[in-house]
Image (spheres, rainbow, N blue to C red):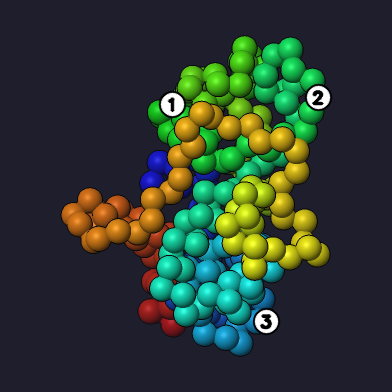
Amino acid sequence: MAWYAKTKFHHIVDLTTWQLYPCLETLEKVEEQYRPTLFQLQHEHPRVIDWIPFPSLRDRLIRLHSANPQIDQIFCDVVSSYTVEACLADLVSEEPKTRVYIRVLDVAMGVANMGNKTIDPHTILPAPDAESLFSLPECAQAAFKLLNMDHGVTQYKLDPSFFGTYPELFDPEEDIVARGAPLRPNIQTRLPYPGRLDNLTFQTYRSFMEFHALALAPLQTSTEFI
């Protein structure tokens, strides 16, 4: 939930609204990258696929993995692979202007420890070394803001290693693979795969659904009124 809040994936609410109330009005509010393709509309598939912000990837997942019982794991691997391209010199002191890519999750988890504190990234960066970007909350927050990781998915790409694991999902015609050298911590965090439904997992889902319910309330009220 901390990762979800920090990256401000609130446009997922609009997608969920359209799934529950499919009509032109709700569809127009869906972020463009999440709007369903014709293939999505024509074929039944696990709804978790709709949450992936890359249309071509959604279509391939429907074609190749709709019946895969591990589809939730693939989804978690996709989200864990979100990256943003950057210039190394902007992030780390005394480094060349080399193109790098950095995973959103690696930075966002450090930002989660900052609470609501805001800082000017230009007063913190470039960091003294690459490790500081992940080990020091202030540096993580600065990189997070500098790279606009909280501005949604429009600039997100995927870590090339994802397609090493799932080569069948690669589409050479789509520019969604990050380019440059990887900039990563010594130990990378990945979103955990869904496990057994224990109390902690239940409370997480409940919190997530309550967050959506608040956003859906106005629409539900207007629908009931009509």
Q: Position of residue 72 (x, y in %)?
A: 43, 64
Tell which circle, 1 or 2, labels the residue nearer the N-terminal end: 2
Tell which circle, 1 or 3, labels the residue nearer the N-terminal end: 3
Residue 176: assigned label: none
Q: Which residue is mark 3?
A: 38
Tell which circle, 3 or 2, labels the residue nearer the N-terminal end: 3
Is residue 18 visible to the viewer in this orientation of the structure? no
Mark 3: which secondary structure? helix
Please state which of residues 161 and 100 is positioned toward the viewer in this rendering. 161
Q: Which residue is mark 2?
A: 97
Direction from residue 24 to residue 66 in the image, left or right: left
Between label 3 and label 2, give the one nearer the viewer: 2
Q: Residue at x 46, y 68 (%)?
A: 71
The type of residue carrying mark 2 is: Lys
Q: Label 1 to label 3, Cα distance in Å?
A: 41 Å
The type of residue carrying mark 1 is: Met
Is residue 10 visible to the viewer in this orientation of the structure? yes
| Other-residue count near label 1 (Cα within 10 Å), few / some / many at <14 / 14–19 / ≥20 | few
Q: Contact (CB < 8 A) between labels 1 and 3?
A: no
| Other-residue count near label 2 (Cα within 10 Å), few / some / many at <14 / 14–19 / ≥20 | few
Direction from residue 96 to residue 11 in the image, left or right: left
Q: Residue at x 53, y 33 (%)?
A: 107
Mark 2: which secondary structure? loop
Q: Residue at x 41, y 73 (%)?
A: 69
Please state which of residues 163 and 77 is positioned toward the viewer in this rendering. 163
Q: Position of residue 166 (x, y in %)?
A: 59, 62
Q: Which residue is mark 1?
A: 114
Which quadrant would the C terminus be assigned to in this image? bottom left
Please state which of residues 191 and 50 is positioned toward the viewer in this rendering. 191
